[in-house]
Image (spheres, rainbow, N blue to C red):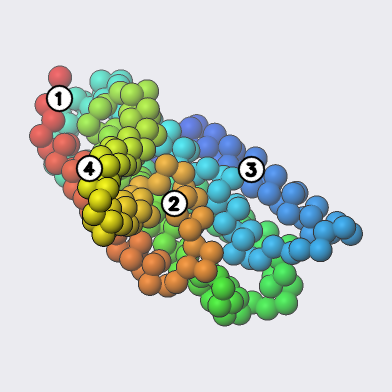
Amino acid sequence: MYKLLKFEFRRLFLRVSLYICLGVIAVPVLSMFYITGSDYFSKDYNYQITLFGVLQNMIRVANLTTLSVVFTSIFGCEDKARGTIKTIYSLGFPRFKLFLSKFLASATATTIMYFLIVISGVVCGLLFSKEGQSSMLDIIGEAQEEPNIILFIIQQFFVIMGAHAFYYMISELIGKTGLAIVLSIFGPGLVSSFFGIITAIISSVAYKNEKLVETVSQMYFTFLQYWLPTTFSSFSDMLTGGSGVVLWISILVNTGYILLFGGLAMLITYKKQIK
C-alpha cells in the first residue's frame, strides 16, 4: 500500500493540471485582497465587513467546486482514457488498494486547493475586517450573530469532500474525462430539479391540504440545504445567523456522502470490466 500511495502522490505533484488549478485559484484570491483592501482604506467607505464575511466571499469567488470537478475527473479518468489501467491491474495489486491510493491522492489535491483558499480568506479577513483589527475572539465564535468560524471551516471542508467523493464516483463510472466533467457539474442540479418537480406536483395535487403542502415544501427546502451544492458557497449563503447545530448536522450529512459515494466508487472499481 505504501508503494502505491508513494506512486500516486508522486504522480499528483508532477501533474501540470494541479498547478494550473492552483494558478486559477490565485486570480480570484488576489482580486479579493485587492477589492477588500481598497474598500477598507477608502475614505468614503464606512462599513467594514466581518472576518466571517471576508472568508465567505473568498470561498464564493474562488469557485472551488468547478476546479475540483475538473481536476478529479482528469485524475480519475486518466488511466482508463489512456488504456494504462490494464497494465496497472496486471501488476497484481488488489483493486481496493489501487482505488484507495488514487482516491486519497485526488482528495489531497482538493484539500490543498481548499486550504489555500481558507488561509487566504482568514489572512485577508484579519487584515481588512473590523474584528481582525480589534479582537481574535470572534474567530472562535464570540460574535453571536455569526457562526463559529473554525466550525464553519470544518463544515465547508466536509462539504467539498462529500462533493469530491461524488465527482470521483462519476469518473470511475464513466471513465471518459469530458463526459465525467459534464455529469459531475450538472448531476447535483438535475437531482435537485427532479425533487423540485415532484414537490411541485404534490403541492398542485394536494393544494387543499395546506399542512401537507407545507410539510412537503419544508422537506424539499431541508433537502436543498444538505444536498451537494451546485456552487461551493450555496450552503454558506444560508448561514448568516446560523447555529452550530446546523453546522454539525451538515458535517454528519456530508460524512455520509463521503462514505456513500466513496463506497459506490470502490464497488464500481471492483465490478467494472476492463476492456
Q: Amino acid at mark 2?
A: Thr
* Mark nearer the viewer, 3 or 1: 3
Distance from the alpha carbon under mark 3 to that under mark 4: 46 Å
Residue under label 1, please give it.
274
Q: Is residue 147 above or below residue 114?
A: below
Q: Amino acid at mark 3?
A: Pro
User: Within 10 angstroms of label 2, few (less than 14), some, or many (20 or more) residues?
Assistant: some
From the top left corner, tell me how far across and down residue 11 is, in percent. Answer: 39, 37
Secondary structure under tag 1 reads loop
Residue at 54% in and 64% down: 240
Distance from the alpha carbon under mark 1 to that under mark 4: 48 Å
Assess whether mark 4 and mark 3 are in contact (beta carbons under 8 angstroms).
no
Locate residue 132: give its quadrant: bottom right
The quarter of the picture where the C terminus appears is top left
Q: Decide which of tag 2 and tag 1 comes sooner along the chain.
A: 2
From the top left corner, tell me how far across and down residue 59 is, in percent. Answer: 55, 51
Q: Is residue 195 above or below residue 212?
A: above
Distance from the alpha carbon under mark 3 to that under mark 2: 18 Å
**Which dot marks residue 111?**
2
User: Within 10 angstroms of label 1, few (less than 14), some, or many (20 or more) residues?
Assistant: few
* Mark nearer the viewer, 3 or 4: 4
* Mark nearer the viewer, 1 or 4: 4
